[in-house]
Amino acid sequence: MKKIEYYLPKEIEKKSFSIIDGELSERGIQLAAEEEMVTKRVIHTSADFDYAETLCYSENAVETAKALIRNGADIVTDTNMALAGINKKVLADFGGKAHCFMADEEVARLAEQRSMTRAAVSMERAAEIDKPVIFAIGNAPTALIRLYELMQESDWKPAFVIGVPVGFVNVEVAKELILETDVPYIVNVGRKGGSNVAAAICNALLYELHKEAGRGK
């Protein structure tokens, strides 16, 4: 049986990242410098080192997403769980706001009327936001599919897509659709993902910007 180690609360995260660094080294995995802080935070959130191999980034994805946030972009999620996990205070410091329209009564009504998922309809609602939007999708592949369809139906495009839905039905193909577009993205290929992963990616970007602005963490 392993011995319990005692740490002050502020030391736990530092120790966790030290362990992650050590295990990545043992596995012979060298993360790209730009993507490192995002991938490590996802591993920290999930305790799953597969993400070091399966997270895919478009060219200059991290810097693109950070620039969007720095200039006041909003974030839209497909679950209230992801919404709850995002550091909205740091986002607000840069002029952005986080949204989730899954509980919106009009979204629910239209979804039932049109035999669609709420996640798909909520993407249509989010597309009406009159500013750049980062879509952080951690649960519903139908949200990614609808984003792709909206791009095909008009000249509208999301500013950025974090595509990490989890599951078995249409999950992999939904992610592949986003990979085929010219929209900047962070996508986890395969079945793994989740609302916690979507929030972790958002927070990795936010915390990095927070540090760059000299505000701590």
Image (tube, rainbow, N blue to C red):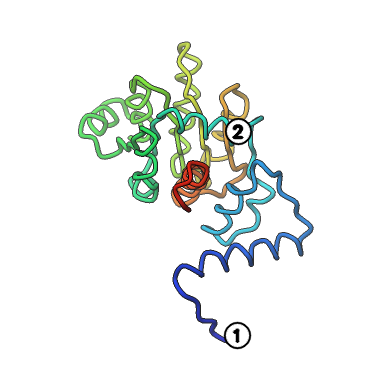
Which residue is pictured at 34% across the width and 19% down the height?
A: 130
Q: In the rendered structure, find residue 163 and report the number of the disc placed on it.
A: none
Q: Which residue sits furthest left?
A: 105
Check the picture and name the quadrant holding the N terminus.
Answer: bottom right
Q: Which residue sits furthest right?
A: 28
Q: CA distance from mark 1 to mark 2?
A: 40 Å
Pointer 1 with pointer 2, Cβ within 8 A? no
Kind of residue at disc 2:
Ala
Relative vertical location of residue 151 with respect to residue 192 in this rendering, above or below? above
Q: In the rendered structure, find residue 61 and report the number of the disc placed on it.
A: 2
Instruction: Find residue 91 and report its image quarter.
Output: top left
**Left or right for 195, reference 65:** left
> Measured from the top left, where is residue 71 in percent x and y?
44, 28
Counting residues from the N terminus, which is met first, the one under dot 1 or under dot 2? Answer: 1
Please state the total of marks drawn on the protein image: 2
Which residue is pictured at 20% across the width and 34% down the height?
A: 105
- Relative to the observer, which residue lies in front, 156 or 19? 19
Disc 1 secondary structure class: loop
- Relative to the observer, which residue lies in front, 9 or 183? 9
Relative vertical location of residue 70 with respect to residue 215 in this rendering, above or below? above
Disc 2 secondary structure class: helix
Which residue is pictured at 52% across the width and 64% down the height?
A: 13
- Relative to the observer, which residue lies in front, 143 or 128? 128
> Measured from the top left, where is residue 140 in percent x and y?
44, 40
Q: Which residue sits furthest front?
A: 214
- Relative to the observer, which residue lies in front, 190 or 201? 201
Which residue is pictured at 33% across the width and 46% down the height?
A: 80
Q: Dot 1 corresponds to which residue?
A: 2
> Measured from the top left, where is residue 15 in percent x and y?
57, 68
Kind of residue at disc 1:
Lys
